Amino acid sequence: MRGTIIYAPGDIRSEELPDPTLTAGTDAIIRTVATCVCGSDLWPYRGIEPVEAPQSMGHEYVGIVEEVGNQVTSITPGQFVVGSFATSDNTCPNCRNGYHSACVDGEFLTTCQAEYIRIPHADGTLVATDGHPDPSQIPSLLAVSDVMGTGWYAAIAAEVRAGSTVVVVGDGAVGLCGVIAARELGAERIIAMSRHTDRQKLATTFGATDIVTERGDDGVARIHDITNGIGADSVLECVGTRESVTQALRAARPGGNVGLVGIPQAVQLSGEELVSSHTGLRGGPAPVRRFLPDLIDRVLHERIDPGQVFDLTVPLADVSEGYRAMDERRAIKTLLQP
Amino acid sequence: MRGTIIYAPGDIRSEELPDPTLTAGTDAIIRTVATCVCGSDLWPYRGIEPVEAPQSMGHEYVGIVEEVGNQVTSITPGQFVVGSFATSDNTCPNCRNGYHSACVDGEFLTTCQAEYIRIPHADGTLVATDGHPDPSQIPSLLAVSDVMGTGWYAAIAAEVRAGSTVVVVGDGAVGLCGVIAARELGAERIIAMSRHTDRQKLATTFGATDIVTERGDDGVARIHDITNGIGADSVLECVGTRESVTQALRAARPGGNVGLVGIPQAVQLSGEELVSSHTGLRGGPAPVRRFLPDLIDRVLHERIDPGQVFDLTVPLADVSEGYRAMDERRAIKTLLQP
């Protein structure tokens, strides 16, 4: 089958790889209907994360079940399925607590930019739709498998409620999906921090009520202007740099909440600033599986359309162009078509 | 009147000072019935915090109202009152959000180890009891003004719920009051981390079900043993060192919560560890005023008896002995009797 391997920063290739096979009774093999390139895939591509050996790439997917192991009971061949980038048994204490991305039996998938994918713990990881969705809904269902699920978690972690004032730091696909989540959760004011016209437009389409183009201290000052000097109830931090995390903390009001889903690379936070801010903080790799049934339902009932974050679609064979377009900011997010 | 001034680390003196006077229409003057020495008072005493000039000390108090300014409407002379170490107008957005210790008009009191105290924003800061309490209840009402209110906030910030497994890091007065709070909020298991026999005993009296004497990695390993490898639902961090904060984060389960009321002195937290832990974090100077009516009620109805943390009482004039006893760990907490 066709799969994707990164060899070095900037060197990503579409290659013929062996088809995956069942390795445990709880596995499923799915035929990929759509996959995509994640912002985090750009870290090794840009050399921010080392590439020590050639490695397979991709962790977002929707597909049709081809084959299941003999212990799989709820997932059956022929079903259309959406899964999270993190596998989960859906039965361990962490899963029962809603933190499927900390499943004691879980792992993070890394082979999904491919024609076929082996999914461990298929019963706990995959959610099947009733029948096959309309092709127009595929991009949104694909978004649900990571960026929409992550944006949703950011809003949940930041405790967005009806009437909240929400700031979204980061205008990548996750931040844009965070705007959708804030709107769905009833936020009254949604302030998107963005300097890119195309992303500002999409943020507004998704429900942003204000756009702030300033960053850092100036950005924080603008948020304080807008919120009568108090700060926002909820801040969704969807970048993960020291600057963006600091900006997020300072934009929140005392007693407000920051959802941290930008994965900080070696960021140190001042305990003193954190504590004196009275701000609640929660983050981490999103437990997308917790939200899948609800988010799939919202997509199928056309309440949300996060698939709009895909502004470029290329054949899976052209994966290198998909990465390049995102790296050069010509695309927000690239959908790969097997 | 008699008051307390620190001149240098280790040099704390009881002195004759001018009586405080009303400086704003919203002030009250109270005659102190009891005050005490806080763990945080030991920072300048121990030289951990610089003493750049002689400064007055003390921020915990109960008293009788002597005089009120012409804008004070709800507090009247003769009332017995309990107040927070942080003054608050109780009307600004931060107060309305429950974060009185971030009141836009607030300040932190520093003159309370004295016979009389000026209380700004008396209406918003003080809570009067119905009639005068029994003398036996004074220590517990005094505890409510800081350590019990702070222990309570730690438990609220750590989202302790009925049935929770709770770890309390720190066996000072705040940690011990955190045990009381966890019990009152319905925790099923309360694990106190303590190495001092007298404090272990008090923790058990207050409701601790388990005592863990190990610290650091060993302490975390014991918590994981006790919680089937998952970690605790809630951790109350009542120390504020890098070690204790790290220990608290690692003792919490994925999706658990840490209440951070030990005020970290220049502690840097790893954003990566924080985020990957999925742990919720909230802390800061406790908004004690939010909890005062409820906590006073629990004391007066003898549901809680946090006054037991005072294991030494000295006359206000002997304040230096009060500090010394706490510094040398001969006392958990010293009550000062004017």
Image (spheres, coloured by chain):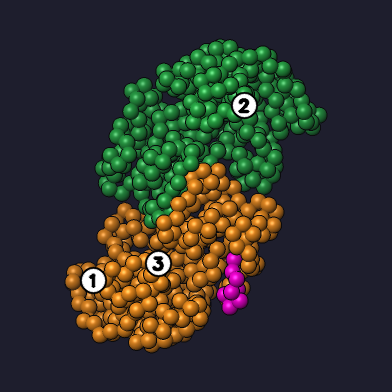
Chain colours: A green, B orange
The type of residue carrying mark 2 is Ala
For residue A243, say whether it is visible.
yes
Image quadrant assignment for residue B218: bottom right
- Toward the viewer: B284 or B134? B284
In the image, residue A218 sits, relative to residue A21, either above or below, namely below
Question: Where is the C terminus of chain A found, in terms of image quarters?
Answer: top right
Q: Measure how far apart labels 1 and 3 are at the Cα level.
A: 33 Å
- Toward the viewer: B252 or A177? B252
Q: Residues within 10 Å of mark 3 (few under 14, many from 20)?
A: few
Residue B107 in picture, x, y percent from top left: 29, 64
Residue A66 in picture, x, y percent from top left: 72, 19
- Residue at 39% from the left image edge and 36% from the top image edge: A169
Q: Measure how far apart labels 1 and 2 are at the Cα level.
A: 69 Å
Which residue is identified by label 2?
Answer: A53
* Label of residue B48 in the image: 3
Q: Secondary structure at mark 2?
A: loop
Residue A275 in picture, x, y percent from top left: 42, 55
User: From which residue to which does the magenta span run?
Assistant: B193-201
Chain letter for mark 1: B
Chain letter for mark 3: B
- Residue at 28% from the left image edge and 39% from the top image edge: A218
The type of residue carrying mark 1 is Asp
* Label of residue B27 in the image: 1
Find out whether the residues at labels 3 and 2 contact each other: C-beta distance under 8 Å.
no
